Image (spheres, helix red, strand yellow):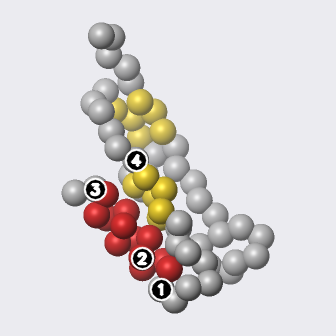
Amino acid sequence: MKNSKAIWTVKTECGPIREKNEDAIYPDKSGSSNLPIKAGIFDGMGGHKKGEVASLIASEGNGR
């Protein structure tokens, strides 16, 4: 099987209604790798208390 290189860019925004972006992304930086990677987008559950904390905990847990 031929090796492939993964290249990714990350971006998130709060959208037109919310003032605070509660989303989190893993990995949280743009990059590239010749190794297998895992990635995730974690929605902050806008309108619920501490949505930004929930998405951050989920993204940090994904990195383990």
In contact (CB < 8 Å): disc 2 and disc 1:
yes
Whole-percent x and y of residue 25? 46, 58
Q: Which amino acid, mark 1?
A: Lys
User: Does residue 41 sit above or below 46 in this rendering?
Assistant: above
In this view, the residue in front, 34 or 48, is: 48
In three-dimensional space, the C-alpha distance between marks 3 and 2, rounded to whole angstroms, equals 15 Å
The local secondary structure at tag 3 comes to loop
What label does residue 50 carry, if any? Answer: 1
The local secondary structure at tag 4 comes to loop
Residue at 48%, 39% (x, y): give it: 8
Quadrant where the N terminus is found in the figure: top left
User: Does residue 59 sit above or below 33 in this rendering?
Assistant: below
In contact (CB < 8 Å): disc 2 and disc 4:
no
Q: Which residue in the structure is indicated by mark 3?
A: 63
In primary-sequence order, the first of circles 2 and 4 is 4
In three-dimensional space, the C-alpha distance between marks 2 and 1, rounded to whole angstroms, equals 6 Å
In primary-sequence order, the first of circles 4 and 1 is 4
Q: Which amino acid, mark 4?
A: Ala
What label does residue 14 carry, if any? Answer: none
In primary-sequence order, the first of circles 3 and 2 is 2
- Classify residue 55 by image quadrant: bottom left
Q: Which amino acid, mark 2?
A: Ala
The local secondary structure at tag 2 comes to helix
What label does residue 54 carry, if any? Answer: 2
In three-dimensional space, the C-alpha distance between marks 4 and 1, rounded to whole angstroms, equals 22 Å
- Relative to residue 44, is residue 33 drawn left or right? left
Quadrant where the C terminus is found in the figure: bottom left
Q: Which residue in the structure is indicated by mark 4?
A: 39
Q: Which amino acid, mark 3?
A: Gly
